[in-house]
Amino acid sequence: MFLLYLSSCQSNVSIQTAQYAVNGQKLYMSHCQNCHGSKGEGLAQLYPPLTDNEYFKKNRTKLSCIIRYGMKESVVIHGKTYKNQMPANPQLTELDIAYILTYITTNFGTSDSIYSHNEVKEAIKACGI
């Protein structure tokens, strides 16, 4: 259903992007939704929303590292500071992370393209961890 919506209502979204987003939605629901909300709205002052397009653009490479290795430092989203740590997700594959990031950035942000498996793989190599 979601795939059909993406491919029929958003002509600028490719079929591959829609497929990545559908797979990402399932993973998001099981790994991210409890803290970040079903619509990426976050949880009060505890966990940030996933709707800041500027943050997505400025940190495109870093996002893969955040999902894989977690985040200990505070983050500013929409002008608000969030200090809770994000746990690492070492069980997620690079492809899983690509799916999740595609889902987040196309559904809660304004992107219309995928995070490719190769892009995530290279980003994780460059994390320096």
Image: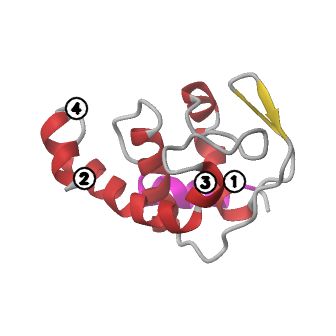
x and y percent of residue 24 in the render? 41, 59
Mark 1 or mark 4: which comes first in sequence? 4
Q: How many marks?
A: 4
The residue carrying mark 2 is 2
Picture layout, residue 36 above or below residue 118: above
Q: CA distance from mark 1 to mark 4?
A: 28 Å
Mark 4 or mark 2: which comes first in sequence? 2
Q: Is residue 97 visible?
A: yes
Numbered disc in front, either 3 or 2: 2
Residue 98 vs residue 46, the one in the foreground: 46
In the image, the segment drawn in magenta is 115-127
Q: CA distance from mark 3 to mark 2?
A: 24 Å
* Mark seen at residue 102: none
* Mark seen at residue 12: 4
Picture layout, residue 70 above or below residue 36: below
x and y percent of residue 87 in the render? 75, 63
Residue 118: within the magenta?
A: yes
Mark 2 or mark 1: which comes first in sequence? 2
Q: Are marks 2 and 1 in contact (CB under 8 Å)?
A: no
Split into 4 quadrants, where in the image is the N terminus? bottom left
Q: Secondary structure at mark 3?
A: helix
Q: Is residue 115 visible?
A: no
Horizontal side of 122 relative to 24 (left or right) equals: right
Q: Pointer 4: residues within 10 angstroms few (<14), some, or many (20+)?
A: few
Which secondary structure class fits the magenta region best?
helix
* Mark seen at residue 64: 3
- Which amino acid is tagged 2? Phe
x and y percent of residue 49 in the render? 63, 39
Mark 3 or mark 2: which comes first in sequence? 2
Residue at 47% x, 38% y is 108
Q: CA distance from mark 4 to mark 2?
A: 15 Å
